Image (tube, grey):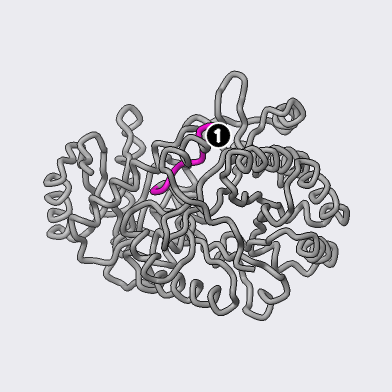
Amino acid sequence: MEGDHLNILVVEDDDFQRRMLIRMLRALNVQGVSDASNGKAALEIIRKRNGNPVDIVICDLNMPEMDGLEFLRHLGEERHSISIVIISALGGKLLLSAGKMTRMYGVKLLGAIEKPILPEQLKELFFKYERSESKWYPRSESISFSLDEIMRGIRARQFDPYLQPKVDLQTNRISGAEALARWIHPDLGVVGPYAFIPLLEQSNQIDELTFLILEKAASACRSLHDTDCNINLSVNLSLVSLDDITLADRITKIVRAAGIDPHHIILEITETAAMTDVAHALENLVRLCMNGFVLSIDDYGTGYSSLQQLTRIAFGELKIDQSFIQDAIHNEAARIVVKSSIDMARELKVRSVAEGIETQRDWNMLKNMGCDMAQGYFIAKPMDLNAFIGYAAGRNLGVVGDSKT
């Protein structure tokens, strides 16, 4: 994909390598190229470009005056909406650590690449940038809502599940979908989760949204089955919700009231929630399994679990966090983490799911590793129920819906 409309800033202290990068970008038809020899100079350029902002920064780590780490910290503190590509000759493990740090500072990481850089790698990152920036809720992350506004929207039932397909990597068939909460705002249209989920969780007010999305997802599952699309739907559970000892029974009643057997609903919990020592949470998880639900450990690899702790929960699915998937093509350490997670899932006889698939290379890599399922923008964006039914019918795919457990 050509980057003729992009504004790219190259931050590299080595003159020769900086010139080579600029030449590569020009060859890829990038017209808006600027450069800086360290983080301090790069920040000055970014701060002065209000009318013509920088889209992507390609940043070395080891630089004089202000190195890449400090530069990334300042970007996070100043909340610039810029995508970052980290480059370094210092090794894949260090790049992986720097990438994690970048995300923790709230900076959008597009990729982390070991030097020397190839034009094909840059072209792939531009393609990835186009996908990430073409979200159908672009305004939501820049708008702030009060807790009262969000709760009024929930009680008015303005929130709907948008379905993102999960596809079997070996057969290319739709095997399920994840139900993701979206606010259908009467004035702003579709609003994405970062505008409301964090505040609801911080305020311990997530439960009403959880039950609303579960109710609507169960109804959507019923509608899909009525069209002979007999897939499973995944719904996210918050760690905050798990402390309520009535949770499992309430979830079971909602799903059965929609005419859906619980084994068609996969409940996704974060790795941190799965590792909790709170007895109420563990009781809920065990009871949900007893009632027929499949448990999925979401964002695997981002928590602090041990293999022994993982065996405490009778989970049927392991979702590998997208940060590892997106780093794996260019980073051997991330690739090893992904492969070992897939192998572990196979040994435990549970299904492995890769999140954040954005390119054909991601798909091919995971298929060759033996991963079971894929989910991400390369396959499809989240969509409403009617669009999902049309998507499934249009592709004329078969259906694989049963869990391995």
Residue drawn at (60%, 67%), measured in percent from left and top? Answer: 404
Magenta stretch: residue 383 in it? yes
Highlighted magenta segment, given as a residue range = 378-387
User: Where 242 falls versus 309 (above or below)?
Assistant: above
Residue drawn at (59%, 48%), measured in percent from left and top? Answer: 230
* Secondary structure at numbered mark 1: loop
Kindly give the residue lying farthest to the right in the view shown.
Answer: 246
Residue 207: x and y, percent? 77, 44
Kindly give the residue lying farthest to the top in the view shown.
Answer: 187
Total number of numbered discs in the rendering: 1
Residue 340: x and y, percent? 47, 76
User: Where 209 falls versus 345 (above or below)?
Assistant: above
Front one among 369 and 274: 369
Query: Does residue 67 appear to the left or right of 9 in the view shown?
Result: right
- The N terminus: image quadrant: top left
Residue 271: x and y, percent? 64, 64
Front one among 23 and 333: 333
- The C terminus: image quadrant: bottom right
Residue drawn at (63%, 39%), measured in percent from left and top? Answer: 226
Residue 346: x and y, percent? 53, 75
**Predominant SS along the magenta part:** loop
User: Where 112 falls versus 306 (above or below)?
Assistant: above
Q: Which residue is mark 1?
A: 384
Give the amino acid type for the residue marked by disc 1 in the picture. Answer: Asp
Magenta stretch: residue 114 in it? no
Residue 253 shows in this picture: yes
